[in-house]
Image (tube, rainbow, N blue to C red):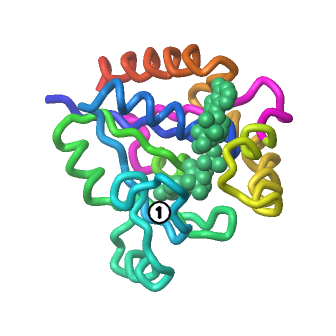
Amino acid sequence: MKQGALILFAAHSGAGKTTIIRELLRRHPEWFFSVSATTRKPRTGEVDGQDYHFVSRDVFQTMIREKELLEYEEVHGEYYGTPAEPVRQALENGKVCIFDLDVKGVMSIKRHYPEQSLSIFIEVPDMNLLRERLVNRKTETPEQIEKRLSRISLETAMKDAFDEVVINDQLEKAIHKTETLIKQIKERC
Ligand SMILES: Nc1ncnc2c1ncn2[C@@H]1O[C@H](COP(=O)(O)OP(=O)(O)OP(=O)(O)O)[C@@H](O)[C@H]1O
Ligand SMILES: Nc1nc2c(ncn2[C@@H]2O[C@H](COP(=O)(O)O)[C@@H](O)[C@H]2O)c(=O)[nH]1
């Protein structure tokens, strides 16, 4: 009986992790995406229940109190957390489960599921690209962009603990590389 696999993505803000995940899920609708809860406001085009469960701080605190979250972190001044029950069910059904997380969230989930997890850090060939991509994305103010980039040193310090680092220079190459890594772990779990 298949146990399911957990694919844990993290990156510096702007590296392209969400773009890669969206394309992987488009190509593999059979894979399960762990929809996080967050107190951050939706960006244009983001759909509640699909990209995130957008909740108030009060609701998020209740989720913490009721132990509904597998892990949670405060990132860039907002709360983000992984609802536990959908993940448990997806794994029970032997699914490949995809997670969009910050670096600390990756390590927390890896501690829960050490044998079934693959952690992937999405990197850029040049750090200047991060600001450029965030500016082009047009979803944050200049102050918010600087706040996001201020986590680079923490993220760099934790990068060595990841199983794989994938450089997102050419998007299609990065998608292909991650897809190959996921197919490999899927064979084992
Ligand atoms: N290989 C690439 N070349 C050029 N632009 C890219 C590439 N990959 C992604 N982008 C663009 O860079 C921007 C940031 O990508 P994305 O939103 O996926 O980043 P992220 O890593 O999820 O960041 P955050 O953690 O801030 O959400 C987007 O506008 C996306 O279209
Ligand atoms: N620890 C967790 N981190 C999460 C979760 N969901 C998303 N994230 C990470 O937060 C930052 C900011 O996300 P953004 O959508 O505002 O750009 C990013 O690194 C996400 O990967 C979660 O459930 N737990």
Q: How many marks?
A: 1
| Residue 14 highlighted magenta (yes or no) | no
Residues in magenta, as a range: 112-130
Residue name at image x 41 percent, y 50 percent: 112
Left or right: 164 as drawn, with respect to 92:
right
Residue name at image x 44 percent, y 36 percent: 22
Residue 27 placement: quadrant: top left
Q: Which residue is mark 1?
A: 81
Residue 97 placement: quadrant: top left
Task: Provide residue 37's location: percent of width, then percent of height.
Answer: 43, 64
Q: Quadrant of ligand 1?
A: top right
- Find the residue positioned furthest to the bottom: 58
Residue 52 visible in the shown view: yes
With respect to residue 83, does 120 lie above or below?
above
Residue name at image x 57 percent, y 29 percent: 163
Q: Secondary structure at mark 1?
A: strand
Q: Which residue is more in the foreground, 111 or 41? A: 41
Residue name at image x 26 percent, y 59 percent: 85
Q: Which residue is more in the foreground, 37 or 109? A: 37
With respect to residue 77, does 44 lie above or below?
above
Q: Confirm if mark 1 falls within 8 A of ligand 2.
A: yes
Q: Which residue is more in the foreground, 121 or 40? A: 40
With respect to residue 128, does 55 lie above or below?
below
Position of the N terminus, as image quadrant, is: top left
Residue 94 placement: quadrant: top left
